[in-house]
Image (cartoon, grey):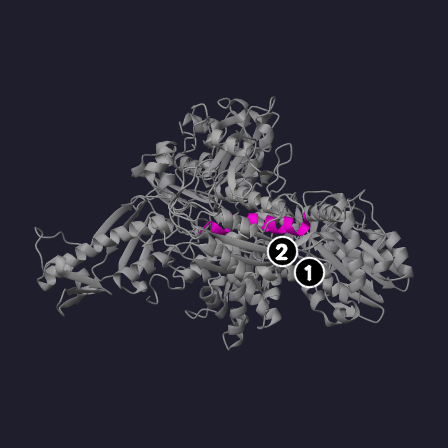
Amino acid sequence: MPNVTITVNGKSHTVDVAPETLLVELLREKLRLTGTHVGCDTSQCGACVVHVDGAAVKSCTMLAMTADGAKVTTIEGLANGSALHPMQEAFREHHGLQCGFCTPGMIMSAVDIVNRKGSELDEHTIREELEGNICRCTGYHNIVKAVAAGAKAMKGGAKPARAAE
Amino acid sequence: MSATGIGAAVRRKEDQRFITGSGNYTSDITRPGEVRAYFVRSPHAHATIKKVNTKAAEKMPGVVAVLTGADLANDKIGGLICGWAITSKDGTPMKMGAHPAVAADKVRCVGDAVAVVLAETLRQARDAAEAVEVDYGVLPSVVDPAKAAAKGAPQIHDVAPNNMIYDWHLGDKAATDAAFASAKHVTKLDIINNRLVPNAMEPRAAIAEYDQGNDALTLWNTSQNPHVARLVISAFVGMAPEHKLRVIAPDVGGGFGSKIFIYPEEVVALWAARRVKRPVKWVSDRSEAFLTDAHGRDHVTKAELALDANHKITGLRVHTIANIGAYMSTFSSSVPTYLYATLLSGQYAIPAIYAEVDAVYTNTAPVDAYRGAGRPEATFVVERLVEVAARELGVDPAELRRKNFVKSFPHQTPVIMAYDAGDYDASLTKAMNMIDYKNFGQRKAASEKNGKLRGIGFSTYIEACGIAPSQAVGSLGAGVGLWESAEVRVNPTGSVEILTGSHSHGQGHETTFAQLVSDRLGVPIETVSIVHGDTDKVQFGMGTYGSRSGAVGMSAIVKALDKIEAKAKKVAGYMMEASGDDIEFKDGKFTVKGTDKSVGWGDVTLNAYIAHKFTGGQLEPGLKEGAFYDPTNFTFPAGCHIAEVEIDPETGKTTIANWVAVDDFGNIINPMIVEGQVHGGIAQGVGQALLEGAHYNSDGQLVTGSFMDYAMPRAADLPSFKVDTTLTPCPSNPLGIKGCGEAGAIASPAALINAITNAVGHENVPMPATPSTVWKAAQGGMKKAAE
Amino acid sequence: MYAFTYERPKNVDDAVKLLKKADDAKLLAGGQTLLPAMKLRLASPGTIVDLSGIKGLSGIKASSKAVVIGALTKHVEVMNSAEVQKSLPALAHLASVIGDPAVRNRGTIGGSLANNDPSADYPAAALGLGATIKTNKREIEADKFFKGLFETALGADEIIESVSFPVPEKAGYEKFRNPASRFALVGVFVSKGKDGARVAVTGAGESGVFRVKEMEAALGKDFSAKAIEGIKVPAKGMIADLHGTAEYRAHLIGVLARRAVAAAK
C-alpha cells in the first residue's frame, strides 16, 4: 500500500493508504480527526472543508495521495491551545450553530473568506461566499452575523488562521 | 432576571465541543472489531423478488456475511410498525401492510433493502453488494397519490385494496354543507403540498454491538427518541427484551422529524451484530438518505372557504389525499389526520369545518413527520384560502383576517382543539408595523420602475405543540403516552445532573434546561449538566419532536425540582433545628422564616448525603427526585409572518426583499435560541416554497436524488429576518411555554406563495416556485394584466 | 470509489506514457468533477494519472493580443489575476462564478475544458472568445474542440497544456444558476473581437456548448443589447428537465445574452 506524508495541524504523519482514499477518510479514519464531517456525496455541502496549504478545500473531493507533502489544517487545529480562534468564538457568541454538524466546515470556510477577502465583510459578500456550505438548522441568519463579527475579530490582532499550518 | 436564568440569552454550553470539532456523532464512533454494512437496494419501484443469489458476493475479499430478507424471516425478526391507529369513516381500522427491515418477497419502492453485506471495510462491502444477484419480477408502479386509488392502479399491499390505508374524516359534514349552501362567496383552491426531503446535514447512522456474556445489545443511532426506538425494536420487532437493549443517541446532527422514526437499518445492524458477533457500523450516504429517509408533506388537496355577506367565514371544506409512501412509517398515520385537520380553523372563528383525508400507499419512500408535520399543510390551506378570498372580495387581506380572528379564549374549534390563549391581532399589527405595510405601495412602484414585480403576503398561523395529553392522544389512536420524564440528581458537592427524556439535536437543551435549573436553584449554570439520549442513564422518555421539549420536557424538570426543593428544605430544617415547613428557599439559600438563620445550597446538599443531622427514620438520605409530566392540553403558538418579494419577470427569479416574523411562543427561556429556531424554520419553509421538491418519475425513480437536483436553501437564497414576539403565557404548563421549533416552517410557505401570487397577479403558482415556474406564471400574469 | 492504480508523473511525457500503458486511465487535474463521479461509482478508471505533480502547466501570461492560461491553473488564480482582470475581465468574472470557493481553489481550466460538461462555464468562454486549446500534440480551435456532451476532440493520449484566449474589444458573461446544483442553468458568453462578435451558450444545449449565429450576425453590426432584442432562440434542441423547460432555457438565452452584452467590458 502506498503511503503519504502529510502535516496535519502542525504534526507530520506518514500513513499507508489505498489510492482511492479521500483526504477526509484519511483525516477521520486514519488520524481519527472526526471534527471534519461528511454530509453529502456530491461535493456540495461543505461539511468537510479543511485548509490545504492555506486554502479551503472540500476534503471529500481530494485524494489523500494528492495531499502528499501538503500542510492541512482541520477544525481541531484552529484553536491556539485552549484559546479559541476568533471565528470559533464568533460562532458561539452569535449562535451561528445549532446541531453543529455543518459547523466545522462552516468555520473553516469562514476563515478562508477572511483570508481572501479581508476583515470588512458585508452581508451580501458573506452570503455569496458561503455558496459551498449548506446548513439546515440556522437559516444562515446567525452564521452571517458570526462570520462578519469573526472577521472583524481576526483583524484585531488575533492569531492568524494559517499560523498552525 | 439573572445572567444565566430564565429569559437570558445565555450562550450555548454545548457549542464548545461543536466549534472545536469535538462533537461525538454516531459516525464518529468506532468499535473494536467492527464490520461495515452496505445495503443492496432495489433499483425498481415495484417488483417481486424471485431469487437472491449471494454466493459470488460471499466469496469477495473481506466479506464477513451477506444476509437477506429470507434470513431475517428465518430468525423471526419482526417488521416495523406505525404506532398511531386511525379509523376510517366506516369504523374499520387502518390497513397497515407488513414492513420487514429487509424485503423477502417483494420490493415496494426504489431503495427498499433486499440484502445487506458485512465486510471488513466499507469499500469491500460496497464492492460485494454489487456482486449480489437479485432476480426481480418488475411490476407496474404508482407514485402519484392522486392516482394511487384509481381503478387499475398497481396493488402495493394485499391488505390495502386500492392502496387505501384509511379514508378518515373530521368535523360536521351537514353543518359545513349548510354553510356552503348559504354562503355569499366561496373561494376554491386546488393545492399540492409538495413532497420534501428533510435532509438533516448529518446522514443517519447506526452502530450495533452484541455482548455475548450478557446476551445484550447496544445500538448507537441518530435518533430523536432513543427510548421509543428501544421500545419498538424490543416489543414489536422482537429483537431483544427491553432491559437487554441499550440505545444511545449521542450528538445528533439535526432531525426535523426524520430521526424520530425507527428505520430498517438500525434493526438490521442489531440483528447482524448478534449474528456475526462483531460490531456492525452503517452510515448512510446522502444518496441513500434521499431514497430511505422518511420524506415529508405530499398532499393533494381541494379546499373551499365559505363567507357571508359581511365577509365572515362561515365554513371550510377540505378533501386531502395524503401520500404515505410504500410503508407506514412510525407516526405516518397521525400526520395528515390529527396533526393536520385539527388545525384547519387557523386563527379564525369558523363555525363549521369538515375535512376528509384519504391516505394511500404509493411506490415511493415512506412519508412521515417533517418539521411542522401536518400543521404546515393545514396552515398553507387556510392561509392561501383567506388571502385569495380577500383578493376575490377586493378587501385588504389583513383586514379580512382581523375580522375573522378568534378574539376570546378559551375557544373551542369545530375540529377538536380548544385554543387556550392568544392575541392574534397583536402579532398581526406588530408585524405590519415592522414591515411598514402602509408604504408597500411605494416600494412596489419603485420596483416596477426597475422592471421588477413586487408582492407581499401574509400568514397568520396557529399550531398545536407540546404534544400532548396522553389520555387525549390515546383516545385519538396514539399507541404511546406523550408525557415526558425528568430526574434531578443533586451531588453532595451541590452540582446538579438533569436526566431528561427529551433529546437535543440542535435545540440547545444543554443550555436552556440548565438555565431553568440555575434560575430555580440559584446555582451557577456551569454546575448543571444535562444528560440525555441514553436508555441506560435515563429511565424513559418520549423524545423530541412537535416542539415539545420546552413545554413538556421542562415541565417535567420543574416537577422534579419541586420535589428536590421540598426535600432540601427538610434537610435544611434538620440542619437549623427548624421545621421544613418554616424554611424559605431563595437564590440558593435556605432561611428559617422570620430569622437570619440560613444555610447555603452546598451545605444542604452535602448534609443530604452525609446524613449526620437526621436519622434514617426521619428522612431518607440523598437528594434525587424524578417526575413524569403529562400535559393538560396542547399548546398553541401562533403569530404572523409577512413576506415581501421582488421578482425579475424576465428570469422568474424571486428575491426575498423583506421578512418579518412576530410569534407568540408564551414565555421564553432563551431568546437567542428561540430566534435561531425561528430563522431555521423560516429557511425550511422558504425551501419548500421556492426551492425544494422531491420528484419521482412515472417509473418510480427519484429524480431529485442528490443535492445536484434537490435544491437546498443556501445563504444567498435567504435574507436576514426581522424577528420579534408578542406574549400570552401558556396557561397549561408551569412555565407558560408554548414551543417554537416548528413555527417558522409552518408559517412561511403560505406567506411566500401569497407574496409571489400577489406579485405576478394570479393564483396558479405551485411549490416550489422555481424561477422557471415563476417565469411562466409571470407571463400569464402579465398577459392577464394586459387584457 | 472502486480501487484504482495511482500515478503522479513529474512531466507531460511521463503522463502520456502512463495514458498509453493503461487502456482505462483517466487524468486527474483538480478533480472537482471526476472525483464526485468516481465516488458515486459513475466513473471507474483503472488508473488515475494525477497531474498535480507536473510543474509548468499552470500560470497566466497576458499580452495585448492574448491571455494564455496553463491547463492546471485553478479557477481562483484566474479570477484573482490582475492581468486577466485587466485584459479579459469577463473571463475573470466567469472564473469567479464557477462552483463555490472551495471548488475554485481546486478546479482547473484544463479539467473543465477536457470534461466538457454541458453546464460548465469555461466551454462558453472558450467558444465565445474563439480560444485555441494547446495540447501536447497540437493546437485545436475551440470551434473544433467541443464535440457534444462530455465529448471533445482530445485523443486518448492527449493532454491539454494551455488555453489561449484572444483579447477581445469587449466581452461579457452572464450565468443563471440551476437552483440545486448551482451549475449554469444557462450561461451566455458574448464577445466583440476583430473577427466580429461571438455568442456562446452553456447549460442549455442538448449537445453541449453552442454558438448563436443569428445573434452574432446582429451583434457584428451593432454590439448592443437592442440589436438582439428581437432574436428568439428556438426551444428545439434545448435541455428540458425539472429545473426548466426547453422554452424557458431558450428564453433565458435571449435575456442573458442581452445582459451580457450590456455588461460587456
Start-end of magenta stretch:
B741-761
- Secondary element under disc 2, as helix, strand or loop, is strand
Image side of residue B497 versus residue B657, left or right:
left
- Measuring from the top left, give residue C265's x and y in whole percent: 80, 67
As drawn, the label of residue B445 is 1
**Mark 2 and mark 1 in contact (Cβ < 8 Å)?**
no
Answer with mark 1 or mark 2, whichever residue precedes in sequence. Answer: 1
Q: In the rendered image, which residue does mark 2 sit on?
A: B645
- Measuring from the top left, give residue C228's x and y in whole percent: 85, 56
- Secondary element under disc 1, as helix, strand or loop, is helix
Q: Nearer the viewer, residue B448 or B6?
A: B448
Q: Quadrant of residue B665?
A: bottom left
Q: Chain of mark 1?
A: B
Q: Is residue B55 above or below residue B548?
A: above
- Measuring from the top left, give residue C81's x and y in whole percent: 72, 69
- Measuring from the top left, give residue A86's x and y in whole percent: 48, 70
Q: Quadrant of residue B726?
A: bottom left
Q: Amino acid at mark 1?
A: Ala
Q: Nearer the viewer, residue B423 or C165?
A: B423
Q: Chain of mark 2?
A: B
- Identify the residue at the far front of this view: B309
Q: Nearer the viewer, residue C115 or B623?
A: B623
Q: Is residue B233 above or below residue C265?
A: above
Q: Is residue B661 above or below residue B249?
A: below
Is residue A41 something that shows in the picture? no
Predominant secondary structure, magenta span: helix
Image side of residue B459 versus residue B508, left or right:
right
Q: Amino acid at mark 2?
A: Val
CA distance for labels 1 and 2 = 13 Å
